[in-house]
Image (cartoon, grey):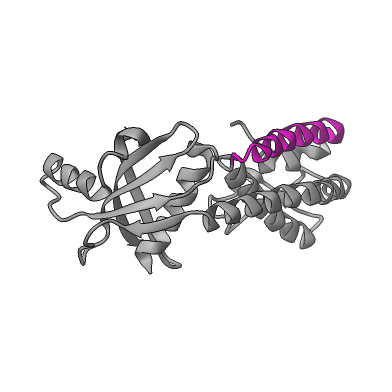
């Protein structure tokens, strides 16, 4: 979805009333999605925005009246900000500071709602091994249900570990390879499906296979799948 960005808050000095209307409108879109138990992309957008605004408030607290923020120089990691001259005066910055502080309680409240949904879904997802798991667990398949449409999705996964300047990161690349009706799946075991996958994809003769189980009838793409993927990464990393 189209979303808020930090420039909306920086430009509040130009038209506070219009900026306030825009923030309220987008927050309503985000909260409407959360009220439908749709976590993504609203939850991720809110967290990113909240982090950026807290960072910006810290920067404004050290503001020098002779300089102003040039948001075009804001890097992707919010590690550095350059300053330029004569874009804002002290009154403008006071408006921005006040505007951000006005918006933060509503943003934090929406983030808290997203965290509650995320934690609830995480707690109601279980991961079980299917058959014998090989020593190399970073590639294989997982089954995950969509209880709204009564199907089970079968994904191939490949987890990669790479290092950054701060810490190692793990990414989970997934590819949907099949969708099985639950009624059809009830006629066979998951071990049978695993054997079928080995026959179908002989280049991976000893895959790690997992069943991700949940009884929740939550939106699949927006909530169940992304939360399950994060939980699977943690499971594989343990």
User: Is 14 on the left-hand or right-hand side of 41?
Assistant: right
User: Is 109 on the left-hand or right-hand side of 41?
Assistant: right
Up/down of 105 relative to 17, above or below: below
Q: Position of residue 203 (x, y in %)?
A: 11, 47
Rendered-image quadrant of the C terminus: bottom left
Residues in magenta? 14-38
Kindly identify the residue that appears in the image at 27 percent across and 48 percent down. 190
**Can see residue 177?**
no
Q: Position of residue 38 (x, y in %)?
A: 59, 39
Q: Position of residue 171 (x, y in %)?
A: 37, 54
Q: Is residue 172 magenta?
A: no
- Determine the residue located farthest toward the right in the rendered image: 91
**Can see residue 68?**
yes
Kindly identify the residue that appears in the image at 71 percent across and 56 percent down. 54
Kindly identify the residue that appears in the image at 82 percent across and 30 percent down. 18
Up/down of 219 relative to 83, above or below: above
User: Is 224 on the left-hand or right-hand side of 117?
Assistant: left
Q: Is residue 21 magenta?
A: yes
Up/down of 180 relative to 211, above or below: above
Q: Main secondary structure of the magenta part?
A: helix
Which of the two residues, 188 or 162, is positioned nearer the viewer here?
Answer: 188
Rendered-image quadrant of the N terminus: top right
Which of the two residues, 157 or 69, is positioned nearer the viewer here?
Answer: 157
């Amino acid at each position: 979805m189209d979303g808020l960005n930090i420039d909306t808050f920086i430009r509040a000095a130009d038209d506070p009333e219009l900026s306030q209307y825009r923030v309220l409108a987008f927050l309503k879109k985000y909260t409407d999605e959360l009220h439908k138990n749709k976590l993504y992309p609203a939850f991720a957008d809110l967290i990113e925005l909240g982090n950026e605004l807290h960072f910006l408030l810290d920067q404004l607290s050290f503001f020098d009246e002779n300089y102003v923020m040039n948001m075009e120089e804001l890097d992707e990691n919010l590690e550095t900000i350059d300053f330029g001259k004569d874009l804002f005066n002290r009154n403008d910055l006071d408006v921005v500071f006040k505007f951000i502080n006005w918006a933060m309680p509503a943003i934090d409240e929406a983030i808290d709602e997203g965290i509650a949904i995320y934690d609830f879904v995480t707690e109601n997802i279980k991961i079980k091994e299917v058959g014998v798991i090989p020593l190399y667990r970073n590639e294989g398949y997982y089954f995950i249900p969509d209880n709204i449409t009564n199907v089970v999705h079968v994904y191939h996964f490949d987890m990669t570990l790479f290092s950054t300047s701060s810490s190692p990161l793990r990414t989970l690349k997934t590819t949907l390879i099949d969708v099985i009706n639950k009624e059809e799946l009830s006629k066979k075991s998951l071990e049978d499906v695993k054997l079928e996958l080995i026959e179908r994809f002989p280049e991976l003769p000893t895959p790690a296979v997992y069943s991700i189980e949940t009884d929740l009838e939550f939106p699949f793409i927006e909530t169940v799948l992304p939360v399950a993927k994060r939980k699977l990464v943690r499971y594989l990393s343990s």
